[in-house]
Structures are given as C-alpha cells and as structure tokens.
Image (cartoon, helix red, strand yellow):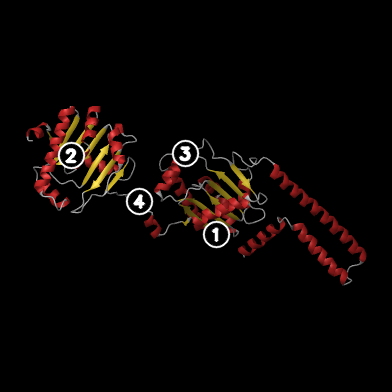
C-alpha cells in the first residue's frame, strides 16, 4: 500500500512539474469539447467561449516558450565562467531531499551522508533510489595517492577512517530499510565529485565539484548544470554513470577481499635506488652471512662514507662457529663450509683495510648462528630518519639460486620488524677487532 501511494505521488509530482503541462491541458480540453460539439451536447455559444479560452492558453504557452528560448540564447552569449562558484548552491540540500533518484560520488562523502541521514531514509521509504560511490578503503596505494592529493593536513590514515565511517553508516541505514540503497567503492580517483539528482528527468540537476590539488579550503570550482545546459549536462551525467558502473559493490566478496590483500613486492636485485640511498646516508647497518660481494663491489662507496663521517655497522656469521657449516649447507648447495668461511674472512680483511685507511666509524660484530634475512638499512637511527631511510632486505632461501629482495620504508608494514631483528642480532653479537683481520692475512 505504501509503495502504491509512493508511485501515485511521484507520478503526480512529475506531471505537475512537466514543462509541457499547458500543452497537455490544451489538448485534453480541445478533444473533450470537440466530442461534445460533435454530439450536440454543447451549444455553439459554449463552444465559442471554450475556443477563445484555448486560444488564450495557447498564447500564454507561446509567450512562455519564447521566454525560455530567450533565456537559452542569453545563456549562450553570457560569460562561460558564470556557472563556476566557490561553494555549493544554497538549495542543494533541499533539492537533494526532494529528489527521487540520487547518485553521490566522492572521495569519502562523510559530511554528505551524515548530513542527509533522515532525508535518505525518507527517500528510500517512498520507493526512491540512492547510489553512493566512494574510494576503495582496502586499496592501500589508492588511498595513499588520494591522501597526498587532497590535503597536506590530513593525518595518515584519516581518509581511510572517514571512508569506513561512511560505509558503516550506509550499511546501517540499508539494514533499517528495504529501499533501494546501493553502495560501491571505486579503484579510480575521479577528477570531481558529483551530486546527480533525478538526472534522467526534466527537472534534473548535476552538481559538480572540481577536486583541486591541495585546496586551501573547500575544493573549487563548484558548478550546477541542468537539462537546458546542453550538451554539458549530459556530458557530466554520463561521466558520473560511467564511474558508478566501474565501481565494485560493497561489502566486498571474500574473493575480492583476497585479491586486495597487501602483498610484498619482490625483485631479483636492488636497483640504483640502493646506491643512491647509500651515497646520501648518514649511517649504514648491514647483516648477512659474509657480505663479500657487497663489500667488493661497493668498496669505494664505503670508503667515501667513512671519510665523510658516516657510521657503518656489520653483523656477519662467525667463521669459526658451527653456524657457518649450517649456513653453507642451507643457503648454497654448491658452496662448501670451507669456502663460506673464507668468504667471511676475506670480508673481514677488506673491512679492516677500510678501517685502517679511513680511521672511520666502522664496527663489526659476529654471531654464532645462521641469519635468515640479510638487511641493508640506511639512516635507521630514530633521530636521523628521513627521505633516505629504508630497509633493503633479502631472504636466504634454501639451496635455491638468488635471494628474493624487497624494500621497506618507515611506516610500511614490516619495516620496524626487520629493523628490530637486525638490532637484536647486533645486541647479541660478539664485537670483532678489525685489526686482527689484517694480521691473519
């Protein structure tokens, strides 16, 4: 019964607001009195009066049409930027509450959804449709990019929190009503936010807010388009519909959640970013079995760092311990324990030479157990973290060629864990006197 009354109310509203209402009335009255005159029910005097009345109504209709035509002509000749405003129109909230079909698109839509809860409920209870599209809060890269674009003042994670608040509010609202409330999340950052109200009808409206980069206040410009703003009304309404169609229904299915789960990005080798980070670092911290290849290939770079006053620390496997046998058998199928021992000893001799040549801040410690993950940490002191702070890590896989490598920066999941593990190795390792390495050469 409620749905039936809602349909009747919507039909009457559409009819009353129809731009062709006067023509409908003119046609119905003319047809009715034509039939009455033909059947002799109405006399000539009455028919003459009705004809004059119809002509008057037609004249008023023509005047109205000419006014609309003149308005359109003037709008085409007017300043094309006159539509642009710095804030939303004053009647947007009212028109949103009176709409029957609403499409809202934005980054988080928190203020909009919280401000129109009661209006949403009323629209849904009368059979209306509401669609809301926000950014996908499970897409880490998307949210980080949007965070950087929207504002310099938003705290990390704030945008994600706002989106989740919106989604929770809409989920709760959907549970309270059987109306047509649809929610989707987008994996694309749109260039604008949209309020599309009854966009397919003659009284429709599309309100567009341009998302500028780091706005000082409310993002601008904001402009309102209505059906007479051809062709741009249809252009922006169609763009909003394409964004909606490309969205993913919320809540995500288990398969979609799995597809969006965070995963590390592995590579076969560290790129030039490792050299750039080392060259600009104030401190360097390395852990590994021997680090012989690294020291040989970066000897000159390490020498420059030490002469510049940088601090360098190494944690290696003690070549005199049984751990070197386990490491050689586990990490390198083709390498003997004797070869592994010699590689560590050779590294220690090279580091001793560096220490002697530069008198720099270079220290080495040895551990009596295998190291599972080798780490190169740049600028890792808490009081010295900056744009070059990073952990370059590599897994020592079991008898397989190559070590999967990945890079983590402060704030990334796992960064502090790997750094803490390296520090734990350092704290439990045995200090090694580098001068002894030269003597044994």
Q: Residue at x 20, y 29 (%)?
A: 361
Query: Visible in this render: residue 222?
Result: yes
Which residue bears the numbered disc 3? 151
SS of the residue under disc 4? loop
Mark 1 or mark 2, whichever is nearer to me: 2
The residue sitting at the right extreme is 45
Is there CB contact under 8 Å for labels 1 and 3? no
Classify residue 363 by image quadrant.
Answer: top left
Please identify the quadrant where the N terminus is shown. bottom right
**Dot 1 surroundings within 10 Å: few (below 14), some, or many (20 or more)?**
some
- Residue 414 image position (x, y, % from top left): 29, 45
SS of the residue under disc 3? loop
Q: Residue at x 49, y 38 (%)?
A: 214
SS of the residue under disc 1? strand
Q: Sequence order check: which comes first, mark 1 or mark 3?
A: 3
Is residue 272 toward the left or the right of residue 14 in the image?
left
Is there CB contact under 8 Å for labels 1 and 2? no
SS of the residue under disc 2? strand
Q: Which mark is residue 180?
A: 1
36 or 398: nearer the eye? Answer: 398
Disc 3 to disc 2, C-alpha distance: 42 Å
């Amino acid at each position: 019964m409620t749905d039936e009354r809602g349909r009747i109310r919507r039909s009457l509203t559409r009819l009353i607001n129809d731009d062709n209402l006067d023509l409908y009335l003119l046609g119905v009255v003319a047809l009715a009195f034509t039939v009455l005159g033909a059947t002799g029910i109405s006399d000539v005097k009455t028919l003459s009066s009705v004809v004059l009345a119809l002509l008057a109504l037609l004249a008023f209709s023509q005047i109205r049409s000419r006014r609309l035509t003149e308005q359109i002509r003037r709008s085409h000749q007017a300043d094309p930027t006159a539509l642009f405003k710095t804030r939303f129109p004053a009647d947007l909230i009212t028109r949103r509450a009176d709409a029957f079909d609403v499409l809202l698109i934005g980054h988080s839509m928190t203020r909009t959804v919280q401000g129109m809860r009661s209006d949403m409920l009323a629209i849904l209870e009368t059979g209306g449709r509401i669609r809301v599209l926000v950014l996908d809060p499970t897409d880490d890269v998307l949210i980080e990019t949007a965070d950087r674009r929207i504002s310099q003042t938003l705290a990390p994670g704030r945008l994600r929190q706002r989106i989740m608040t919106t989604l929770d509010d809409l989920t709760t609202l959907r549970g309270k009503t059987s109306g047509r409330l649809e929610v989707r999340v987008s994996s694309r950052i749109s260039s604008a936010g949209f309020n599309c109200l009854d966009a397919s009808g003659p009284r429709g409206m599309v309100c567009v807010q341009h998302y500028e980069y780091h706005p000082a206040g409310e993002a601008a410009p904001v402009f309102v388009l209505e059906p007479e703003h051809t062709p741009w009304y249809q252009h922006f309404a169609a763009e909003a519909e394409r964004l909606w169609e490309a969205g993913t229904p919320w809540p995500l299915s288990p398969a979609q959640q799995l597809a969006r789960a965070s995963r590390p990005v592995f590579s076969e080798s560290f790129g030039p970013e490792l050299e750039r980070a080392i060259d600009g670092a104030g401190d360097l911290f390395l852990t590994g079995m021997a680090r012989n290849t690294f020291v040989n290939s970066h000897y000159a770079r390490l020498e420059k760092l030490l002469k510049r006053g940088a601090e360098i620390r190494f944690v290696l496997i003690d070549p005199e311990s049984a751990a070197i046998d386990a490491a050689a058998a586990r990490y390198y199928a083709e390498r003997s324990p004797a070869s592994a021992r010699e590689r560590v000893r050779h590294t220690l001799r090279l580091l001793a030479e560096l220490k002697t040549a530069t008198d720099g801040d270079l220290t080495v410690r040895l551990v009596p157990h295998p190291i599972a993950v080798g780490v190169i940490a740049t600028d890792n002191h808490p009081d010295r973290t900056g744009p070059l702070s990073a952990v370059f890590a590599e897994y020592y896989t079991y008898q397989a060629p190559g070590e999967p490598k990945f890079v983590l920066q402060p704030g990334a999941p796992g960064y502090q864990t790997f750094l803490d593990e390296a520090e734990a190795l350092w704290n439990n390792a045995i200090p090694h006197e580098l001068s002894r390495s030269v003597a044994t050469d």
